[in-house]
Amino acid sequence: MACARVPLDEQQVTEADPQGKERTLPALHPARKEERFFVPYKPPPEDSSPADVEEFLEHAKFITEDLEWLLSLPHDKFWCQAVFDESLHRCLDSYLHHAPRSLDLAALPSSPAVTDMQRSIHRAVFFIFVRMATHKESKEHFITPAVFGEIIYNNFLFDIPKILDLCVLFGKGNSQLLHKMIENIFTQQPSYYSDLMEAVPTVLEVFDTILNKCGLDFEGATAAEPMKLSANKPTPMTMKEQEFVDLILYLCDSTTTIHTFLDIFPAGCPSFHEHGFLSRLASFYETAVPDLEKALRKRNFDNKSLQQDLWKRLSHSCRKMVETAHLLLHHRCLQPILEGGENMQTDAEELLQLYTSFLTEKRFLSDFDELFPVVDDISLLQQALPIIDETRTSYLLQGVESAWDSVGRRRPQNQIQHQVPSASNYQGGGVGAAAFTDGFKVQDDQETEGGDDLRGAAAILDLPQKGHNGAVCSVSGAALESLLSCIKDLLPDLGEGFLLACLQEYDYNSELVINNILEDRLAPSLNKLDRAMPRPVKEELPDVMNTRSNVFDDDEFDVFRRDQVDMSRIWKGRRKGENVREMLNDKQHVAEQRARYQTYETVVDEVVIEPGENGATYSLDDYDDEYDDTYDMNQVGANDLDGDSLLNRRPFTIPQVLKQTNRRGDDEKDDDEGEEETLPINVNRDQFVQDPALLRERAEARRAAMQQRKGFRPEHPSNVAGKPKGQGQTLETMLDRRKKEANKSRVSNHNRRTMADRKRNKGMIPS
């Protein structure tokens, strides 16, 4: 058995040989490998025929069982199998080579059994590579780091192509774990850095191969083979359809793999940067992408779904190339500047130099600026290094704006107002990717000659840049007049109406309007207008007084619509000649209401309806569906003690204010019955204030009657004062004093005695 806490590379094991004799071998020895054959991996079938699905499931079941068995082995047995089993290496390599990528999964048949089996193999392969990238599983099971690096490097357990495939296959959702795996591999074996440095030129050959297949070339590219002078150069339009499809798939797979690797392992960015990968990538993008997009639009595909899938992959490739360039710029130049490294000035100079080299690649620069605005990086650079040359940054930002103009595209709306303080004339960008929309719908084959509808990532090179077509003027009246006068000075023959339409079309950019007019590159909608069109007459706004709406409209005091108003009906304060007593005694409104309430005195219990002219009669015996007769026979509450009030109709009562004067006696009688006490007969009703003594006497009598009725017992008077000192005190006085002392805490200063005792006990008050 292996010794505890001893590295696996130093352990010795004793076991029996095939002849039965005991022998001592190193823990890592080919003789300890189990004889097991791992079958290579085959991808899922493209069609969902039962035979192909059954064959794949049976084949995949063997692979899954073998991989699960390998994962269940102990530490020493696992490494013997991983190092010396060639069939295992072929199985893992076949999966890395043939396993479907993320963009290929959508094209596979949606069979639940195939999906589950593919997921099982994917999981087992990933765990095997994770275990092979770990040199220490526990305190008892580990390998010396230096020896671990030699084992994985000399036995090709990992190499640069495998690492790239691992990133693209397992990077989604496992980026952190993959980062730790790759970082451990490169840390324990630094030779992988030199291998990565040697692999970058091979990666660059991908771009050369694609350009050669398309019959294109750019400065710095190395042709794979010399081309005959008499041979016709192939183009994306003339090559076979299958070759064109393979070319797009090759580009998509390559760009996705490179971006995923650099995103998971940023430490590999310097290796790519040292080979001038950024400049080669930008040149390839500028040269190849427009031709590929044009061919993809104009080629006749029998399968429209294939055309849409290829466009999606091409757009995906463009996006990944731009994101790869941003990763290299960020990790190589911008991040060291933000972290305050020692070579901040050198990194800033290199960043500006790289951006300046992009100025010639108009298409690439505009797409890069759309996803990652250059103005943001320049702003961060100016904040980190205030001494940066503002003239250079301003020139760079103006070059970005010129790139947008040259490709005939316009920025998204959210990029217009984004500006940098050092370049006040530059309008920068925001984040948006209209050029890389995955859901692009490929246009129909019916296209007019010279009138291509370039959408998605395509650029319209023949059409001018357009503005934002805002319906609302974004400039003030004075600024608009200034723009018009500026253009009229150069082009006096044009009408102001035409110029206003041009300014509105091009977002009130006078320079762009002048440039497009002089070069005769106006939008088609502007070419249809009369260039001498005058300025439209501004409609006068209606009068506010005529359009207002008020509750006092058209009344007798509406001074806005009436020239004459009866001033006798308008006064301030008390009206002249008006007597207050006469106004109070005026009971005209009471008389007007009296007749209204008198109609309620006539109460009719039953109304007899005579037969009408049409012979229709109505009887109380007639049945009505809407009538609820539930309680007709029940006299609810009629048998109560106060049943008379329910069975008999209550007489009608005239309101108090409408009662006649001659009924005054009856009213007083009714009021007197509701009062508990009657006023004395000799009360002077003209007396304004009654005798206070009499009022107090009445109040005391009412209070005594109420207390007697409620059984109130008056409080016992307290006798705390008692007799003078020296004459002795009664028991009642002593009890009252004790009660006061005990209950004095209920009133203010209730803690006076308690706090005084506390201070005295503390020695704060002399006793």
Image: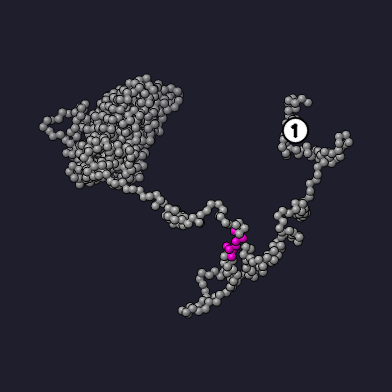
Left or right, residue 41 beside residue 572 = left
Q: What residue type is labelled 1?
A: Arg
Outermost residue, left side: 230
Q: In this view, does 526 lie above or below 358?
A: below
Assess whether residue 585 is covered by the magenta stretch: yes
Secondary element at image label 1: helix
At 86% across and 34% down in the image, what residue appears?
725
Position above or below: 315 against 612 = above
Q: Is residue 380 left or right of residue 592?
A: left
Report which residue position mark 1 lands on: 753
- Residue 490 visible in the shown view: yes
**Span colored in magenta:** 583-591
Left or right, 748 with respect to 46, comes to right
Q: Does the magenta stretch include residue 519?
A: no
Camera-side residue: 709 or 637? 709
Q: Is the magenta stretch mostly helix, strand or loop?
A: helix
> Could you say which is closer to the camera, residue 735 or residue 465?
465
User: Where does the image place residue 429, in percent across and percent down from the top left?
Assistant: 32, 34
Q: Where is residue 164 in the image (x, y as percent from the top left)?
A: 31, 30
